[in-house]
Image (spheres, rainbow, N blue to C red):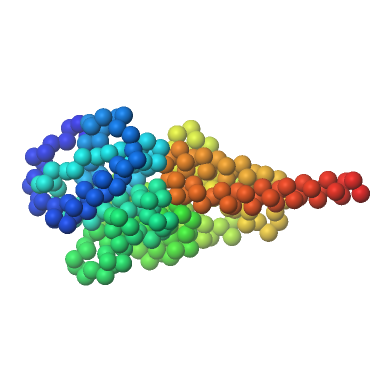
Amino acid sequence: MLRGWNQKSVNRDASWPVHGQRRIRALFNLCSKDTSQDDGGRRDECSVVFVARHPSCIFIWQAPSEGRGGLSSPRPPNENFTATHNVETTLITWQAILNLMGRSQKRTTELQGEAMDEREFLSQEEETVGFSMDHFQAIKSLVFCYFGAHDAGAELAIKKGDIYLKKSPGGPVGSVDCFCRSVSLYDAARKHKRKRRFCRKHAVAARSTMRAIARNDLALANERLADYLLSSSKLNDGDREDARFRLEKAIECYTDWGALEKAELLPPKLEDLKNQLSAAFEETATSQCL
């Protein structure tokens, strides 16, 4: 698909605004600071074409894994490249990538950094923003889901419903938006689920994503199961041990995927869990000696 890209097919719309071109170029420089050039220029050029023509979460899935935590070094697009509305949607997507990679001053769900500032974006007139607002809400659902802000994600899902999917049926962002909204809503309602059934469903999800080599989904499935086990009012040593395994697996998958900011948030939780296991073991050993 990328090799078949035709420059003439994208020149029928207005060129990118000057401020958009400058910001995109600045992002290219930012993301190429510590990345290798081993893959050559053609792959980099294709990355630019892909993100500019398809400003969607598919790029989020692929970009963090480029060089294990660093984006490839793309070349700036042609001056007469694609329509103006693609600038904002691309920057929204790119900021989510930077948040996942830990390049936004430790920001997680707030899309504020080198690519964009959501406060400036939300201050614009509604008729000016247009479709970009729907794209922004879809990307917010994604970061809410991956950074564990499920209450905010569920609230957003209830307010906006299927607006994005209805306006852009069949779009690459739509299916992932539905998935992320579902995860947040499910988490908000999980207190009504029985523990055994909940654990079984998450275990099935983890196995299926592992077979599909979907590192991002596997990481999320393991993290969600660990959180559920640790939130149980009747927590036992078996649950703690299972949660420890799930957290270690989630950290490994997030690191392999390239979402380093997310991976750095889990070790403190894992360390606390290990301390609990150690304390429980010592308590058991002491009681047996007595």
Which residue occupies the extreme right position in the image? 290
In front of the other: 25 or 131: 25
Q: Residue shown at 21%/70% (left/top)?
A: 125
Q: Residue shown at 75%/51% (left/top)?
A: 279
Q: Quadrant of the N terminus?
A: top left
Q: Residue shown at 77%/46% (left/top)?
A: 281
- Within the image, what quadrant is residue 70 found in? top left
Q: Is residue 88 visible?
A: yes
Relative horizontal placement of residue 230, taking residue 125 as reference (left or right) = right
x then y, percent, for residue 87: 20, 53
Q: Residue shown at 46%/54% (left/top)?
A: 147
Q: Is residue 176 above or below residue 40?
A: below
x then y, percent, for residue 60: 34, 45
- Within the image, what quadrant is residue 72 found in? top left
Relative horizontal placement of residue 236, taking residue 25 as reference (left or right) = right
In front of the other: 1 or 277: 277
x then y, percent, for residue 102: 41, 50
Q: Is residue 178 visible?
A: no
x then y, percent, for residue 137: 33, 60
In front of the other: 284 or 1: 284
> How many labels sit on residues?
0
Q: Is residue 24 above or below residue 42?
A: below
